[in-house]
Amino acid sequence: MVAQWLLKGAIIFLVLSSVFAIVGARNLSQQQAYGRDHLLDLAAHPHADIDYQGLIAIYPRPNVVVERYPILVKHRLSVFRNRETFLESP
């Protein structure tokens, strides 16, 4: 009887932890997609106002992203690997 309750408890725990892990992974993926979109906007419009909140999703210090994204564009790395043209930052 006790073994059955322990087994049911373990199964419930595993199912709930899997559900929470999936939800967390989905949220992280959405945040990273939001950050990538803002990075692409930054590259397409380098002289526009910068949305630092969008870039925080990529890296905790968005000023580092702003300083280094021209390297990604130049060498076609990260989100820029399949992009044909982007304006180079001055």
Image (tube, rainbow, N blue to C red):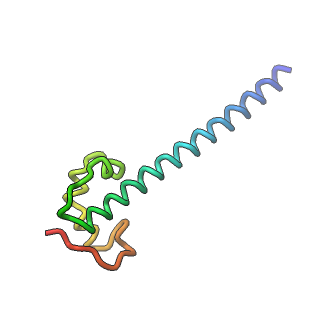
Residue 70 versus residue 32 in the image, above or below? below
User: Which residue extends farthest bottom?
Assistant: 84
- In the image, farthest residue toward the front: 48
User: Looking at the picture, how far across and down is residue 28, in whole percent?
Assistant: 46, 48
Residue 68 position, x and y percent, is 22, 61
Spot the residue most to the left. Answer: 90
Give the quarter of the figure containing the C terminus: bottom left
Residue 4 shown left or right of residue 19 in the figure: right
Residue positioned most to the right? 1
For image coordinates 40% across by 54% down, the residue present is 34
Which corner quadrant of the image does residue 88 belong to?
Answer: bottom left
Of 51 and 16, the residue lying toward us: 51
Seen at 27% across and 52% down, the residue is: 51
In this rendering, the count of numbered labels is 0
Identify the residue at horizontal 27%, vertical 70% (top origin).
73
Q: Residue at x 37, y 59 (%)?
A: 36
Q: Is residue 8 left or right of residue 16?
A: right
Residue 14, located in which quarter of the rendered image? top right
The N terminus - image quarter: top right
Q: Position of residue 82 (x, y in %)?
A: 39, 75
